[in-house]
Amino acid sequence: MRLDTDQHDALPSLHTHSVNLAFYKALTMADQICDIGDIAGYSYESKYRLLRVDQRLDTTDEDQFEIALVDDEALTVIYYARVALVLIPKVSDQYFARHRVWRSADSYHSLALHGISEKVLYHYIVLSNDLLLTEQAVSGSGHFYLLRQVSRAIEHGLYVYAYELANQTLRLIPSQLELSDIENTVWSVAGEDPIMALISKNPLHGH
């Protein structure tokens, strides 16, 4: 899937109990499902499972998958990420994993959700794919989410770049200080241009 053709459909609204229950059943009864808790380093109460589901949305499409944290006692989904693999040919011949995420606002699950985005992104997805972060990852608080995850990527020692889609250029973000500078300059005047960051275990082309 190319970046310019990725539609990345809106996520379902899982705040309603009936919708969430139906979604829980659909995910946990999918044909291609595996528990990734050990790989991602996620461990909390045994009723919570961190799952990866493949080819549920489209049985012929290997360019997207789903990750969910479920509560098997309450039969509910408390974290859900839809991941699409996209190509950015002028940057890399490797796929970038672009995601959108929903998480429960119920305080009952706050401890179970602690650090879940970091586990999913930097202890699981980045093992196999580079990352593409955008403000559209989270509805309403996408800008804060992007900055937080970029900051975490720097802490994890990954290669982080600001990516300008219009001219397809990269700018390395090697430190928290540089991130602050980009936030106050390039990203503060982005206007209608999407704010994107690329994250990789290795340097990208020419950088």
Image (cartoon, rainbow, N blue to C red):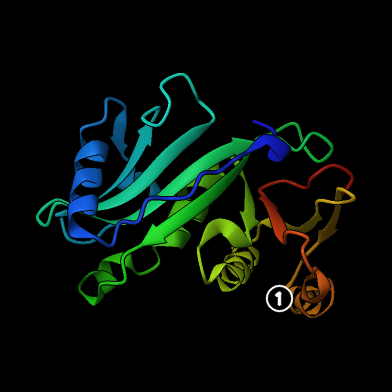
Q: Nearer the viewer, residue 174 or 198?
A: 198
Q: Position of residue 58 (x, y in %)?
A: 43, 26
Image height of 140 relative to 157, above or below:
below
Task: Quadrant for residue 170, please give it.
Answer: bottom right
Q: Amino acid at mark 1?
A: Gln
Q: Position of residue 168 (x, y in %)?
A: 86, 48
State the residue in front, 165 or 207. Answer: 165
Residue furthest to the left: 73
Q: Residue at x 31, y 71 (%)?
A: 105
Q: Is residue 138 left or right of residue 150?
A: left
**Can I make out residue 15 in this image?**
yes
* Relative horizontal placement of residue 61, taking residue 74 as reference (left or right): right
Which secondary structure lies at badge 1? helix
Q: Residue furthest top?
A: 60
Report x, y in % for residue 174: 77, 66
User: Residue 32: x and y, percent?
Assistant: 31, 27
Residue under label 1: 176
| Residue found 53% across the figure and 43% down from its top | 127
Q: What's the residue at 62%, 62% (across, down)?
A: 135
